[in-house]
Image (cartoon, helix red, strand yellow):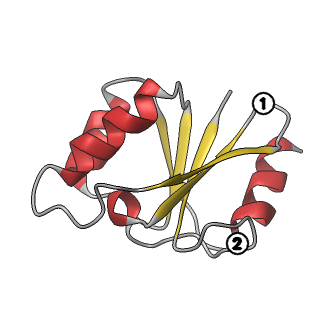
């Protein structure tokens, strides 16, 4: 299991982003609940296709769950069509990850 958490900063103490596909970063947590990767969202400022492009990036990393404050319809549809669970959550990335893995 890999979990991606949308954030505005590139560290685990960051708040979860309310912007979903337009989050500046995605923190990737592995099956043990450890932060394994920090991805800068290079699609965040694109004018179009942001949701599907970000979804494909996360799908290619074999992410099974994505956590964000809010999911746009295209982002959510692209993820769910590939069996990726979408969880709307607020709070801090490390705290939410810890709760999911405990």
Residue under pointer 2: 92
Compared to 11, does 40 lie above or below?
above
Badge number at residue 31: 1
Measure the alpha-carbon separation of dots 1 and 2: 19 Å
Identify the secondary structure beneath mark 2.
loop
Point out residue 14 in the picture as x, y percentages from the top left corner. 66, 74
Tell me if mark 2 has few (under 14), some (14-19) or many (20+) residues whose alpha carbon lies within 10 angstroms of its own. some
Q: Residue visible at 25% across and 42% down?
A: 53
Q: In the displayed structure, does residue 75 sit left or right of residue 60?
A: left
Tell me if mark 1 has few (under 14), some (14-19) or many (20+) residues whose alpha carbon lies within 10 angstroms of its own. few
Tell me whether circle 1 and circle 2 mark residues in contact (CB < 8 Å). no
Point out residue 99 in the picture as x, y percentages from the top left corner. 82, 54
Compared to 25, does 74 lie above or below?
above
Q: Residue visible at 52% across and 45% down?
A: 66
Q: Of residues 69 and 9, which is closer to you in this image?
A: 9
Identify the secondary structure beneath mark 1.
loop
Q: Of residues 23 and 90, which is closer to you in this image?
A: 23
Q: Residue visible at 75% across and 53% down?
A: 97
Residue 82 placement: quadrant:
top left
Q: Of residues 51 and 80, which is closer to you in this image?
A: 51
Say whether disc 1 or disc 2 marks the residue closer to the N-terminus.
1
Q: In the displayed structure, does residue 98 sit left or right of residue 43?
A: right
Q: Of residues 90 and 25, which is closer to you in this image?
A: 25
Locate the C terminus by quadrant. top right
Q: Residue visible at 20% across and 47% down?
A: 74
Q: Residue furthest right?
A: 102
Point out residue 32 in the picture as x, y percentages from the top left corner. 85, 34
Compared to 81, does 69 lie above or below?
below
Locate the N terminus by quadrant. top right
Q: Residue furthest left?
A: 48
Point out residue 96 in the picture as x, y percentages from the top left corner. 74, 60
């Amino acid at each position: 299991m890999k979990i991606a958490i949308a954030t505005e900063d590139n560290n685990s103490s960051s708040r979860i982003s309310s912007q979903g596909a337009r989050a500046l970063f995605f923190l990737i947590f592995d099956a043990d609940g450890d932060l394994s990767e920090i991805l800068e969202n290079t699609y965040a400022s694109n004018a179009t296709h942001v949701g599907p492009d970000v979804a494909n990036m996360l799908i290619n990393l074999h992410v099974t769950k994505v956590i964000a404050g809010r999911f746009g319809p295209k982002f959510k549809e692209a993820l769910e069509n590939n069996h990726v669970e979408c969880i709307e959550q607020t709070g801090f990335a490390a705290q939410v990850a810890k709760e999911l893995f405990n």
